[in-house]
Image (cartoon, helix red, strand yellow):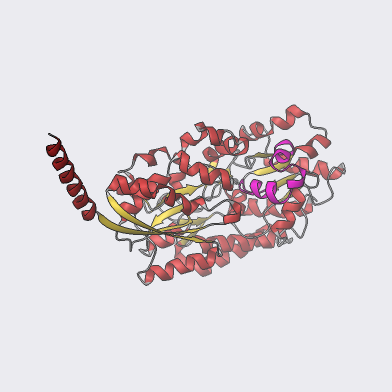
């Protein structure tokens, strides 16, 4: 009996060895842009954490090459395009969702709808985020992180202005319901300047350069960038309202003339201590930076929780508050020889446990509906408290022509901010759009 058992054991081991030897050898390369010091290393490190799990699930021998990159976005994206054209692209590339339109149209990445259907993990993604991953009726990316781009406010300065604790605590909800509008915010900033609570020009700080943060002024005034059938548009009335509003900030004394062009570090140094600037338009991920690098000596995160709040971008002419989200996306290159394995890796990191590692360390919002229920995420009052903003979020469209649209819109912003009449700023933007996009754009 013992001899038989030993014989069966030997045979079993031999068969196991044959099976192991027969396992497919697969190499997957993933490249991620990440600010390691800012806690963003999990963008690619999460793959290493699930490598063995995917090997066992697929019955393969997986060799994982991770390229963790901290270079500037422009160079990073250019290198991917050049590598793809040379047939040397990584299997998985992380980038902003706005690249989906251009890279899909150029054939550099593949649609993922069929692969998504094979993994139940993706059913947990916040539904609104799939909008940012879609181009030409197909899904081309998997959200890696999200954020809200809210308005931050100083609780300390609102208190100095005479607001009660209850009024301060209820501000985010009053913004959410439309009771406290963008005009109310500017009026409050004007009052703070008039009463000497803040110095002139320090009632409202907005973005210092070109970027997605300028879109709420256009979208909140009823503007549309791209129709459902993919037609790029520019709405004169919405742009006029946006430029009039942007041009009013300096005139009303709530924003400095030098706001555009100011270094972000200088803005953070002024706002984070909560005693200089009343309202600031920023991004949720900046909270961690402030806690670590600007108010650490005052108490870091605890100080911010006590003295700084955040709310949706208050309603403008369309009566609806909003936020803006710029999700980063995992995409699979068209040159990948193993897209099924790449997708299995993406599914394995699209879980509350894996995404929490990145979200909490880098102060980004989670991408999953069940993350709010997880103990680690719920224990972070800013992230869990801001998660509702994803229900109100808007995105830049995925189109190869967004950069041209954005640059023309930005030209009008710069003009309006420096005193050019809003009507002239609109015509400046329209002329640039027509020159660069021709019949690719409809001017309304």
Can residue 39 be seen? yes
- Give me the residue at 52% from left, 34% from top: 372
Q: Position of residue 62 (x, y in %)?
A: 33, 55
- Residue 288 belongs to magenta span: yes
- The number of callouts visible is 0
Residue 184 appears in view: no
- SS majority, magenta: helix
What is the x, y in percent for residue 191? 82, 41
Q: 193 or 12: which is nearer to us?
A: 12
Q: In this view, does 18 lie above or below 334?
A: above
Residue 177, placed above or below residue 36 = above
Residue closer to the observer: 2 or 423: 2
Q: Does the magenta stretch include residue 399?
A: no
Q: Please identify the residue farthest to the top as the structure is shown.
A: 166
Residue at image coords 46%, 52%: 329
Residue at 64% across, 52% down: 242
The stretch of residues the image draws in magenta is: 281-308
Q: In this view, does 182 lie to the left or right of 109?
A: right
User: Where is residue 334 shown, x and y percent of the image?
Assistant: 33, 61
Left/right placement of residue 371 relative to residue 86 reads right
Q: In this view, does 251 lie above or below 434?
A: above
Q: Residue at x 39, y 62 (%)?
A: 90
């Amino acid at each position: 009996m013992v001899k038989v058992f030993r014989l069966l054991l030997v045979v079993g081991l031999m068969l196991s060895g044959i099976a192991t030897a027969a396992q497919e050898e697969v190499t997957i390369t993933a490249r991620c842009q990440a600010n390691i010091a800012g806690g963003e290393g999990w963008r690619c490190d999460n793959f290493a954490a699930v490598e063995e799990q995917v090997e066992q699930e697929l019955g393969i021998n997986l060799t994982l090459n991770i390229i963790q990159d901290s270079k500037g976005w422009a160079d990073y994206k250019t290198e991917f395009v050049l590598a793809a054209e040379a047939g040397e692209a990584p299997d998985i590339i992380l980038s902003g969702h706005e690249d989906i339109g251009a890279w899909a149209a150029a054939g550099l990445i593949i649609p993922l709808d069929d692969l998504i259907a094979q993994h139940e993990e993706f059913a947990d993604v916040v539904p609104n985020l799939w909008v940012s991953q879609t181009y030409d009726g197909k899904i081309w990316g998997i959200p890696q992180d999200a954020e809200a781009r809210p308005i931050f406010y100083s609780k300390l300065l609102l208190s100095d202005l005479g607001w009660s604790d209850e009024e301060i605590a209820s501000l985010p909800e009053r913004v959410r319901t439309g009771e406290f509008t963008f005009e109310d915010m500017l009026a409050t900033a004007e009052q703070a300047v008039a009463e000497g609570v803040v110095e002139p020009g320090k009632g409202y700080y907005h973005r210092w350069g070109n970027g997605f943060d300028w879109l709420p002024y256009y979208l909140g005034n009823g503007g549309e960038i791209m129709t459902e059938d993919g037609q790029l548009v520019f709405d004169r009335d919405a742009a006029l309202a946006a430029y009039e509003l942007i041009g009013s900030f300096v005139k009303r004394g709530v924003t400095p003339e030098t706001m555009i062009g100011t270094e972000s570090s200088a803005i953070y140094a002024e706002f984070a201590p909560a005693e200089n600037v009343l309202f600031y338009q920023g991004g949720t991920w900046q909270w961690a930076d402030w806690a670590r690098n600007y108010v650490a000596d005052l108490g870091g995160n605890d100080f911010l929780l006590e003295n700084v709040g955040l709310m949706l971008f208050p309603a403008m002419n369309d009566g609806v508050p909003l936020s803006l989200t710029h999700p980063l996306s995992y995409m699979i290159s068209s040159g990948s020889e193993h897209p099924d394995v790449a997708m299995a890796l993406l599914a394995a990191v699209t879980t509350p446990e894996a995404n929490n590692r990145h979200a909490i360390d880098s102060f980004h919002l989670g991408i999953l509906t069940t993350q709010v229920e997880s103990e680690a995420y719920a224990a972070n009052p800013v992230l869990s408290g801001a998660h509702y903003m994803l229900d109100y979020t808007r995105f830049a469209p995925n189109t190869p022509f967004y950069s041209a649209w954005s640059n023309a819109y930005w030209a009008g912003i710069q003009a309006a901010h420096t005193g050019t009449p809003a009507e002239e700023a609109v015509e400046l933007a329209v002329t640039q759009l027509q020159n660069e996009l021709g019949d690719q754009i409809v001017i309304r």
